Image (spheres, helix red, strand yellow):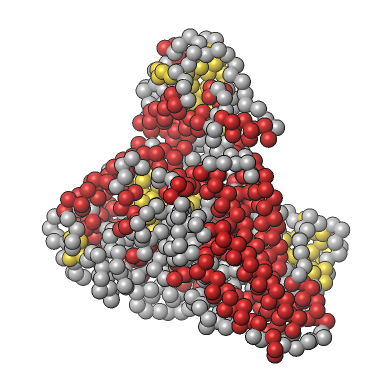
Amino acid sequence: MSSIKRRNFLGALGCAPLAWSQSGTGVSIVASSRDPVAGAAPTQWATRELQRALTDAGVSVSRHESIAEAGANDFCIVATAMTDAHAESFRLEPSKSAGRQVVYARAADARGAVYALLELADRVRHASGNPLAALDIAKPIAEQPLNPIRSIQRMFCSDVEDKPWYHDRDMWPPYLSMLATQRFNRFQLSFGIGYDFLRDVTDAYFLFAYPFLLDVPGYHVRAANLPDAERDRNLAMLKFISDETAARGLHFQLGVWMHGYQWIASPHPNYTIEGLNAANHAAYCRDALAAVLKACPAIQGVTFRIHGESGVAEGNYDFWKTVFDGVRLSGRKLEIDMHAKGIDQNMIDTALATGMPVKVSPKFWAEHMGMPYHQADIRQQEMPKGAATGLMALSAGERSFTRYGYGDLMREDRKYGVLHRIWPGTQRLLVWGDPVTAAAYSRAFTFCGSEGAEVMEPLSFKGRRGSGLAGNRTAYAEQSLAPRWDWQKYEYTYRVWGRHLYNPEADPDQCRRAMPSPAAERALANASRILPIITTTHLPSAANNTYWPEIYTNQPMVDPRQNNPYTDTQTPKTFQNASPLDPQLFSRGTEFVDELLKGERSGKYSPIEVAQWLEDLAAAAQNNLAQTASLRGVENKRLLADVEIQMNLGRFFAAKLRAGVRYALHERTGDRAALEGALEGYREARAIWARIVSRTTGLYVADITVGEHPWLRGHWADRLPAIDEDIAAMAARMDSAKVVDDPPVRAALEEAAAHPKRDLSAFRHKPAHFQSKDGVALEIAAEGVKLSAARLFYRHVNQAERWQSAPMQARGSSFHGAIPAAYSDSPFPLQYYFELRTGPTQAWLYPGFAPQWTAQPYFVLVG
C-alpha cells in the first residue's frame, strides 16, 4: 500500500500513524549469534528481511551482536529468547536502554522470532510517511498460535502450466518469504494429484513422481521420453525448494499422491513408466522414496494418498508397509501424513509401527470450502454401503463415510494427529478474504483436539488432466492485469488465512494495512462469505471435479436429463432436490415445500433463509463497492472485479433458490401462480448471470481450465444456453398449470417471497460438564418467548453415525432432557443442539448461527 493510501485508510478509521518519538539516525538490529533463538539460522534470515525492508524504505540499518555496539542515537531492535513460553509465540516489547528507544523481539523459538521480526518488516513496508513510525510500538504486543499446523499446499498438475513456476528460482524465495510473513509454518509441494484414476491419462508429468526425480540403483525404472538431464534438474529443484523452505523456519512436506504406474485406456500419454511390475513395485517405491529423502534432507514429512485413487487397491497393507519403510530408511524423524479417505485402523497401525509421528488429514467440507464449522452430518450418499470389492473396496463400501469429512477419526484415545484439509472446489480463481470468517475457521480447526489445517492454495488443479494452456495461470485476458507470479494476485488471501490460523484474535490492522481502503476491505469480506454459504447449503456434487460454483454449470429444475453433470446427488437430480452438504441443519427445496404444505416446519434452515443471507451479503458488498470508485491501479481493478463477480453470484443463487422453492411447490400441486413465480425468479437469476458474463468478458479468457470436462473449463458465457433451455422447459409447462385455491399453497408462496431472520437472543443454555459413562443432564430456558415444545438432538462426534433425538420436558419457562449414560460411555466426544418451537410453523435451532454466520451451531462435550 502506498503512503498516501495508508494515510487515507488510517484517517477513515479515525486513527493516525504514530509520530517518530526521537531524532534517530538509523536502526540497529541486534541478534546475537550466541543467543539460542536469535542465533538460529531462520532468525538470522528474518533479520536480513527486516534489514531489507528498512533499507528499501530509505532507512540506514546496521546489525550487531549487542546493544552496546549500536549507534548512540539509533533505534534498536533486539531479537532474543523468551523462556517458559508457548512454541512459536513472540512478544514485541517497547523499552529504553542507555537513552535509546528499543523494541525487544522476544520469542520462544526460531519460528516465533521469525514472526516477530517479519511483523516489524511488514509494518515498515506498509507504513505511511516516516517508515520508522511503524516501529514505534506504544505497548507490548504478545501473540501465540492457536493451531499447531498452518499449512499451504501447492500442487503440480500440468506439464504446460506448472513447469514454469516449479523451475523458477526467482519465484520461490519471495513466495516462501510471503508464507513465513503471514505465519504459515508448513508448506506441502504435491506431486501425482493431477489424476484421481489412471484412465485416459494424457499429461503424466510427475504423475508417478519418483522416476521424474531420480534413477534408483538396482532398478531399471524410468519415465520414457524424459531426458536424464531434465530428471536430474527436477531433483535439484526439489532440493532447492525444500532448502529454501527450511531456511525460513517452515516445515517442508513432500506430497506423493500417486503410486500407480500403469495408465489404463490411455493411447496418447506424454510419458509412460518403464521397468516396473507387480514383483518390484513396492520395493522400488520404498527405495525411491528413501533416496529422495536422503537427497533432500530439508524434507520433514511425506503426505500419502492411501486409498484406491493412489493406484493401489485399498486393503493392500503390505504394499504400504513397504513404502512406509522408505520413510524409516531416511535415517531421520519424519512425519507420515495420510489422506483420510478409505483409511482404517489397520492402515493407521501400519504407519504407527514405523515409530514416526503420524497425521491423518480428512477433507473439511468435502472437496469444497464450507462455512466455518464442521458439518453436523454427512449426506446420505456418504453413509456406509456395506462390503465392496476392487480398487475402492473400503472408501466405496464400509468406510465410505471417510470420503468427505472426519468420519470416525475423532476418538479421544487416538495416537495420531488430525489435520483438516480445505479442498478447492468452492473457490480457486476469485480473490477471497474475510478476517472475521477466517478467525472462525481457525477456531474450528482445533475441533476435538485437531491440530490445524492445510489450505489448497488458489488456482489449485489449474490445467489438470491435460487441460493446461500456455499463458498466465490467473487467466486474465487483459495481460496488464496478470501479476508476474500467479500467487501475487492472492497475497491478501494468504495474509487473512495465515494470520488468523495463527491467532484468531489478531489485531485487525494486520490485514487492514494491506488493503487500499476500509470500504474495499468490507466489500471483499462480505463477498467472501457468499460462496462458502452456497456450498454448505446447496450441493449438487461433493466432488470438485464436478461442482464449481464460481463458474457454475446450471443444474436443471425441469428435466434432470438436460445437460446435468451432477451424478452424486439425490434422485430426481434437479436443482430443487439437491441436498445441502449439511443435511442435518439445512433443508433442500423439495423437503422445505413438503413441510410448508404439511403445515409442520422443522427447525432446519430453509432455502429461503439462505437466499436472504445471500441477498443481504450481496447488498452489503454493493454498498461497500460504491465507496471504492476513486480507487485506481491494477491491484485494485483485480480486487474490485472479483468482489463484483462474487456479489452477483450471491444474487444469482438467491434468485434461483427462491425460484426452486416455487417450482417445487408447482411440482407438488400443479399451481399456476407457483409456476409463474418460479419463472419470474428464474428469469431474474438469468439476468444476473448475464451481468456476470458482461463483467467477465474481456476480463478473463474464454477458456479457464481446471479439468478436461466442459463443466471444468470455459467461461461464464458458456453457461447461459443451459439456463435458457431450462427456462424454456419451465415455460412450456404453463399451458397445463392450474389455479389451486388452497390456503397452504398460498401460505407457501408467501413464504417463498419472505425475508426471514431468526432471533435467538431469548434462549439461555449453559453447556454441561461431561464425563464418560455418566449421563448428561441438559436444560434450556426461554425469556419472553412461550415455547410449546423442545427436542434434544445428540450424537457422538462420529460421522458414521446418525443423530439421536428425544423430546424434552417442560418445567416452567425451561425444558429439561438428558443424553443417556449408556450412550455417553464412548471413546468419542459428544455433540448436541436443540430444536425449539412455539407452534407447528415456528421453530428454531439452538445455538444456531450468529449474525455473521461464524458460530459453531452445536455444543461439543469432550471427556
Residue at (45, 47) in percent of width and height: 480
- Rendered-image quadrant of the C terminus: bottom right
Q: Is 620 above or below relative to 179?
A: below
Up-down: is 627 above or below 377? Answer: above
Q: Residue at x 58, y 76 (%)?
A: 724
Tell which of 513 and 481 is nearer to you: 481
Between 583 and 172, the one nearer to me in the picture = 172
Location of residue 516 in the rendering, given as x and y in whole percent from the top left corner: 58, 39
Q: Residue at x 16, y 65 (%)?
A: 275
From the viewer's perspective, is 731 left or right of 185?
Answer: right
User: In this view of the protein, which residue sits in the foreground, 438 or 471?
Assistant: 471
Residue 175 place in picture, x, y as percent: 40, 42
- Residue 781 lies in quadrant: bottom right
Q: How many marks?
A: 0
Write the residue at 56% across / 58% down: 695
> Does residue 687 appear in the picture of this structure?
yes
Whether 458 is drawn above or below 586: the answer is above
Depth order, front residue of 796/33: 33
The picture quadrant where one finds residue 846 is bottom right
Q: Is residue 340 visible?
A: no
Q: Is residue 130 left or right of residue 295?
A: right
Which image quarter holds the N terminus? top right
Hey, which quadrant is residue 765 in on the image?
bottom right
Q: Position of residue 683 (x, y in %)?
A: 66, 72
Residue 526 % position (x, y) = 64, 52
